[in-house]
Image (spheres, rainbow, N blue to C red):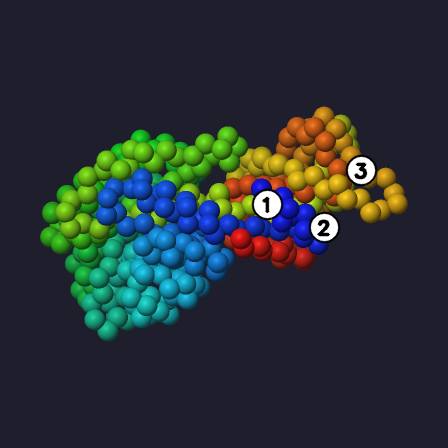
Amino acid sequence: MHADLLRALPAPACAYVYDTAALRARAAMVRRALPPKATLLYAVKANGHPAVVEALAGVCDGLEVASGGELALAVTAGARRIVFGGPAKTDAELRAAVAAGALINVESEHELRRLAAIAPRPPQVCLRVNRPGGGLRGSHTMTGAPTPFGIDESRLGEALRVPGVEVVGFHLHAVSNNLDGTAHAAFVRDALDWSLRAAGSNGVDLRVVNVGGGFGIDYQSRAEMDLSDLSSVVVPAGLDLIFEPGRYLAADAGAYAATVLDLKTTHGRTFAVLRGGTHHFRLPAAWGYSHPFTIVPVDDWPHPYPRPEVTDTEVDAVGELCTPRDVLTRGRHVTRLRAGDILVFARAGAYGWDISHHEFLRHDPPVFVIV
Ligand SMILES: *Cc1c(COP(=O)(O)O)cnc(C)c1O
């Protein structure tokens, strides 16, 4: 991926490449798979690079944000719609969200009261509800289990009696990285049914159901959630069904690339030591998996001393940090790998740089290349 571009970078290369055409194509593909007239938002926390946010703001219906910083990014990117969620909003963030015309997903009764006190007019909001069940398996379960997200279903009646806010819908984001498209479509149908019932029994004029994100991809097999069951979900007339995926939109449009600085074998294991590592791309270490890589061979070797090289062997791709946990990939077979070659980690566009601990050891950051 982008081999010539990577070879042209000053050596040793260390870069994130974000492909805006790929972002736009991906958003178009996701939109085609959703039920007609459903709203597609991009969850900015997956990748908040301004170029990524701007590209997706242009092709999605809007952006989902979870902090004052993301809200400011969304406003700058010219998002047509903004939805603001998160369990720990400050008064300043609530004020900024009201001023930006964002639809706020309120996460507690206390937050409802704080918002009512701040807003000049009763704002229309969605209530985030942590319902029992939900039946989705992914890497992070957020609903149907004890979590800080949303209100307990048993408190719905009390929450809906808080004066000074107008609840127009429910927010039911449930999971991250779900790989089962059939289960996801069933979750969406169930979320619609539950919302209609809850609205009916509590006298809510239901206009919005937000089913969140969570469309998954499998980093090791390259599989991903099959969206094809979603298009047949029937959305009641006049209801705004909101999807807000992050990972699924951004992952494939980003690659992380790092030059091999050294190759060595200790106690029978071979290590490719990179100009980079988990302080730039923390996801494999955080989730405990091996992220696949491809090799961009760099034939140029301008040095008088021999070039480290391995052939037909398994290598661990490790970073420049002084910790044995700085591992991106374990035991990947290579036919040939040399110091100076560049490893490319695809599918690094979501929860890559944005979740990493950049300042640890104070190495230079990667360059960000936008194509
Ligand atoms: C993180 C998050 C998303 C996006 O999740 P993905 O798994 O990246 O699709 C959407 N909505 C909310 C409320 C979130 O917290």
* Residue underneath mark 1: 2
Relative placement, left or right, of 176 versus 305 is left
Q: Which quarter of the figure is the N terminus placed in?
A: top right
Res 135 quadrant in image: top left
Q: Which residue is situated farthest in the front direction here?
A: 4
* Residue underneath mark 3: 308
Residue occupying image coordinates x 18% and y 53%:
207
Relative placement, left or right, of 164 versus 213 is left
Residue occupying image coordinates x 59% and y 45%:
2
- Could you say which is closer to the camera, residue 61 or residue 102? 61
Figure check: 96 above or below 237: below
Q: CA distance from mark 3 to mark 1?
A: 24 Å
Q: Secondary structure at mark 2?
A: loop
Instruction: Name the mark nearer the viewer: 2 or 1.
Output: 1
Indicate which disc residue 12 carries. Answer: 2
Q: Which residue is situated farthest in the top direction here?
A: 312
Instruction: Please report whichever mark, 3 or 1, sits nearer to the chain's N-terminal start.
Output: 1
Residue occupying image coordinates x 53% and y 32%:
220
- Whether the residue carrying mark 1 lies under 8 Å from ligand 1 is answered with no
Q: Amino acid at mark 2?
A: Pro
Circle 2 crowding by C-alpha within 10 Å: few under 14, some 14–19, many from 20: some
Q: Position of residue 175 (x, y in %)?
A: 37, 41
Q: Position of residue 148 (x, y in %)?
A: 37, 50
